[in-house]
């Protein structure tokens, strides 16, 4: 599923269009209240474990525990997305070197924007990714209001073109800590399937659906479904 229009053009000229999405109002207020309650409670409960994870990452190679990256959020606005660092410190340089020397890896990256056997991922990073613990700092993004508990996964600027005209659907809601993609196979899905899932969520979101997605996320995380 891919829109024909240029993604960047659509993002600049229609990111806040809401003709195909639920009207903002009481449901959005309830959703935001749920985000704050869940994220705040989770941070209080999980903060000791998060501190331990941060310390382990720091002790492993001396690098920063957090990875910060600009992502595209509501209305196409950029925000700083937080994650526990799961890759080596010079990950971008390593990626460029790998893609320039390995045609298969370059083709896989061009198709899916990910590598199944990514050599940049550290030992602790592999564990964090499979258990989704690397995403926990995004609870801070939820409290800030740049993300929601449930929504499309936040994308980087380079992925906008892959959405085509459908980028306006993506940008009509806050990106989420979990969503349809996470409970539908995650990395086992194609990028086009991910776009379709994001569009489906943006056009049909409802509080009761958010609750179901949140509950289905628990077994998906426990069994590391599609995680690598």
Image: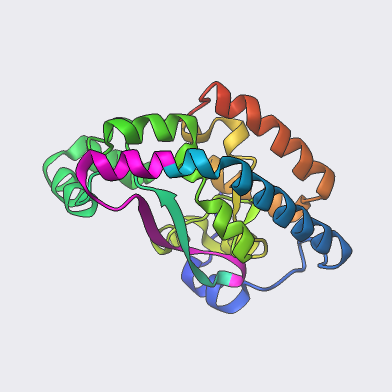
Q: Which residues are magenta?
A: 52-75
Query: Horizontal placement of 52 versus 176: left or right?
Result: left
Image position, residue 20 (x, y; %): 76, 62
Q: Name the foreground residue: 5 vs 79.
A: 79
- Give above or below for 115 relative to 70: above
Image position, residue 18 (x, y; %): 74, 69
The answer to which quarter of the image holds residue 101 is top left
Residue at position x 49%, y 38% in the image: 49
Is residue 191 something one can see in this rendering? Answer: no
- 72 within the magenta span: yes
Residue at position x 38%, y 59% in the image: 68
Image position, residue 34 (x, y; %): 77, 53
- 30 within the magenta span: no
Residue at position x 17%, y 47% in the image: 94
- Give above or below for 74 relative to 212: below
Please identify the residue farthest to the bottom as the structure is shown.
13
Query: Horizontal placement of 52 versus 32: left or right?
Result: left
The answer to which quarter of the image holds residue 23 is bottom right
Image position, residue 200 (x, y; %): 69, 48
Please identify the residue farthest to the top as the structure is shown.
223
The color scheme shown is rainbow
Query: Horizontal placement of 71 versus 206: left or right?
Result: left
Is residue 74 something one can see in this rendering? Answer: yes
Please identify the residue farthest to the front as the structure is shown.
48
How many labels were placed on the picture?
A: 0
The answer to which quarter of the image holds residue 179 is top right
Locate the C terminus by quadrant: top left
């Amino acid at each position: 599923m891919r829109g024909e229009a240029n993604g960047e053009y659509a993002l600049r000229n229609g990111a806040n269009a809401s003709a195909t999405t639920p009207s903002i109002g009481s449901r959005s207020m309830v959703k935001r209240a749920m985000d704050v309650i869940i994220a705040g409670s989770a941070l209080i409960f999980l903060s000791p474990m998060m501190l331990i994870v941060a310390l382990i990452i720091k002790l492993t190679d001396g690098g920063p525990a957090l990875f910060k990256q600009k992502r595209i959020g509501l209305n196409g606005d950029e925000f700083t997305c937080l994650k526990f660092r799961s890759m080596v410190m010079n990950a971008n340089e390593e990626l460029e070197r790998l893609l320039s020397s390995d045609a298969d890896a370059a083709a896989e990256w061009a198709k899916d924007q990910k590598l199944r056997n990514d050599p940049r991922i550290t030992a602790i990073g592999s564990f964090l990714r499979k258990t989704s613990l690397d995403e926990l700092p995004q609870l801070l993004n939820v409290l800030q209001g740049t993300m929601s508990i449930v929504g499309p996964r936040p994308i980087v600027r380079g992925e906008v073109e892959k959405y085509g005209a459908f980028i306006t659907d993506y940008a009509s809601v806050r990106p989420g800590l979990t969503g349809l993609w996470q409970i539908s196979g995650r990395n086992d899905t194609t990028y086009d399937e991910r776009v379709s899932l994001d569009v489906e969520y943006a056009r049909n979101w409802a509080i009761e659906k958010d609750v179901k997605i949140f509950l289905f996320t628990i077994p998906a995380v426990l069994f590391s479904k599609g995680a690598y």
